[in-house]
Amino acid sequence: MTSRLRYLAGLAGIGALTAAVSRGLAPPARGALGLALVLAVAVQGPLGWWLIGAVGTARFLVVWGIGIGARVGLVAVTAFIIVPVLHLTLVPVLVPLALLLVALLGLEALVLLLERRAAEVQ
């Protein structure tokens, strides 16, 4: 399995797990979690894909830095624009968003670790 396929499988797994967790929540919390999932995957998904493709290249640190900046920017835009425009409560959106971003960051790290191990074996 390639790194990119592992990453896509991980994205799908995190999405499925989040959807399963949301079933046990009250409708307002379910909506906030759904919004956080959509935002996190929409921003982090392509950035993680880009980062995995940049492994072993000179641009890796630049891509990594852009990803960190995009995550911080997403949290700021969500807090100062999206939540007020949608008349939502801040905490129920930002906490799951932050947790999902951390989970997706962990997914990137896991995929890169598995890629490194596979390269060492060869």
Image (cartoon, rainbow, N blue to C red):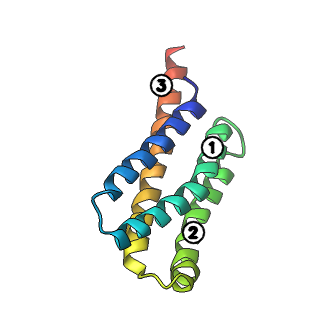
Q: What's the distance in space between the residues labelled 3 and 1, CA to CA?
A: 19 Å
Q: Amino acid at mark 3?
A: Arg
Classify mark 3: helix, strand or loop: helix
Q: What's the distance in space between the residues labelled 2 and 1, CA to CA?
A: 17 Å
Within 10 Å of the Cα at label 2, are there few (<14), some (14-19), or many (20+) other Cα atoms? Answer: many
Classify mark 2: helix, strand or loop: helix
Give the number of the disc on residue 74.
2
Q: Quadrant of residue 110?
A: top left
Pick the front one: 112 or 92: 92
Q: Residue furthest right?
A: 58
Q: Amino acid at mark 1?
A: Trp
Mark 2 and mark 1 residues within 8 Å of each other at the beta carbon: no
Please give the residue where the numbered disc 1 appears in the rendered image. Answer: 49
Pick the front one: 77 or 120: 77
Give whichever of discs 2 and 1 has the lower sequence position.
1
Please give the residue where the numbered disc 3 appears in the rendered image. Answer: 117
Give whichever of discs 3 and 1 has the lower sequence position.
1
Q: What's the distance in space between the residues labelled 3 and 2, CA to CA?
A: 32 Å
Q: Residue furthest front?
A: 27
Q: Residue at x 35, y 69 (%)?
A: 27
Q: In the rendered picture of this protein, how many numbered marks are placed on residues? A: 3
Q: Is residue 117 above or below residue 103?
A: above
Q: Amino acid at mark 2?
A: Leu
Q: Quadrant of residue 66?
A: bottom right
